[in-house]
Amino acid sequence: MKQSLLEKETPEIWKDYLSLAERVSSDGALSAKIKELMMVALSIALRCEPCLRVHLKRALKLGATRAEIAETLAATLLMNGGPADVWSREIISEVLGE
């Protein structure tokens, strides 16, 4: 992957970012596996293909099953579709004169 401008021009900030990523991804109140599955969901919601590849591989390495990944996908579907409906209801009703 090509080096980012942030990494090139502000290596100290990039190093801090990587340190934060490592700390956040570690076991805590939530297991590292659960956190990676959360990041899979966010990667899908944000449509970040490189993110999805990285976090899926990490989740699998931490023992995530196909069933857990499928449920993560289902939760992502719910949280993308449901909010789209809820958010648009008032505007649609207003425009349709209801």
Image (cartoon, rainbow, N blue to C red):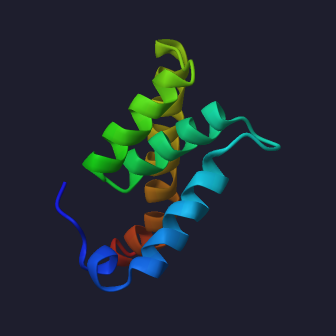
Q: Quadrant of residue 36?
A: top right
Furthest residue in direction bottom, as rendered: 9
Indicate the position of residue 42 as horizontal and vertical percent values. Answer: 47, 50
Furthest residue in direction left, as rendered: 2
Judge whether 39 appears above or below 73 on screen: below
Residue at screen point 65% across, 54% down: 24
Q: Nearer the viewer, residue 72 or 74?
A: 72
Residue at screen point 47% across, 22% down: 60
Q: Nearer the viewer, residue 93 or 59?
A: 59
Indicate the position of residue 34 as horizontal and vertical percent values. Answer: 64, 34
Q: Quadrant of residue 31?
A: top right
Is residue 44 left or right of 41 when viewed as pictured?
left
Furthest residue in direction right, as rendered: 29
Is residue 26 left or right of 1 when viewed as pictured?
right
Residue at screen point 61% across, 47% down: 25
Q: Nearer the viewer, residue 44 or 78?
A: 44
Judge whether 11 appears above or below 76 on screen: below
Looking at the rendered image, the quarter that the C terminus falls into is bottom left
Indicate the position of residue 85 as horizontal and vertical percent values. Answer: 46, 55
Q: Quadrant of residue 46?
A: bottom left
Looking at the rendered image, the quarter that the N terminus falls into is bottom left
Judge whether 64 appears above or below 51 on screen: above
Judge whether 91 appears above or below 59 on screen: below
Q: Nearer the viewer, residue 1 or 74?
A: 1
Q: How many marks?
A: 0
Residue at screen point 43% across, 57% down: 84
